[in-house]
Amino acid sequence: MCKIKECTINNVIYGFFTFLISITLSGCMQSNAATTGSEIATTAKPQNLITDNKLKIVNAAFYQTFVLGDWRYKGARNLGGTINAYIQIPAPLDMSKEVQKSYLQKAICPSSAHTNMWSEIDGIPLSVHIYTHKQKNSLYVNCINPLIIAG
């Protein structure tokens, strides 16, 4: 008889602790979701979904530019809600990082002539990366949508 009471008490205790752990984990997940959601809501406007079609449109805009020459366009990817376009260059550029970024912004980021592309990705950030060997060691710049008029 004592053994049955002991097993029942142990089961109740284990059940109680399991219940407390699940409530704690649930609270942590909800707190994290609420915190993350509020940070996103305050720092960025709602973005469009990055579809394969949008990536193809970005790819088409860049492929045209890098058909000839030593620079190779390696495609666009969705990383963290940003479209990242990668260009492999044969050797590091002989200019400071700031000058390289300015060059990317002015000469490599798609111009207003790419109206279809900019309209399609409206609200989605576009970054252009250049690298020599590894993409993770790239230098990048965030392109500015020329169709958006600063107010």
Image (spheres, grey):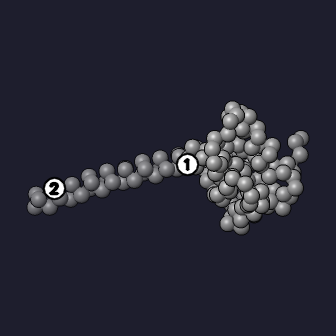
Measure the alpha-carbon separation of dots 2 and 1.
62 Å
Left or right? Give the position of 140 relative to 12. right
Residue at 70 percent across and 43 percent down: it is 141
Judging by the rendered image, the residue that carries numbered circle 2 is 6
Where residue 138 sits in the image (x, y, percent)? 61, 44
- Crowding at dot 1, Cα within 10 Å, few <14 / some 14-19 / many 20+, comes out as few
Where residue 81 sits in the image (x, y, percent)? 65, 53
Foreground of the two, 52 or 1? 52
Say if 53 sits above or below 97 in the image. below
Where residue 115 sits in the image (x, y, percent)? 86, 58
Left or right? Give the position of 83 relative to 114. left
Say if 95 sits above or below 72 in the image. above
Q: Quadrant of residue 66?
A: bottom right
Q: What element carries label 1?
A: loop
The label nearer to you, 2 versus 1, is: 1
Quarter that holds the C terminus: top right
Foreground of the two, 124 or 135? 135
Quarter that holds the N terminus: bottom left
Most extreme residue toward the bottom is 53
Residue at 67 percent across and 43 percent down: it is 140
Which numbered disc covers residue 134?
1
Residue at 65 percent across and 48 percent down: it is 89
Q: What element carries label 2?
A: helix
- Three-letter code, disc 2: Glu
Q: Is residue 120 visible?
A: yes
Residue at 77 percent across and 49 percent down: it is 109
Q: Quadrant of residue 54?
A: bottom right
Most extreme residue toward the front is 69
- Three-letter code, disc 1: Lys
Which of the two labelled residues, at mark 2 and mark 1, occupies the earlier sequence position? 2
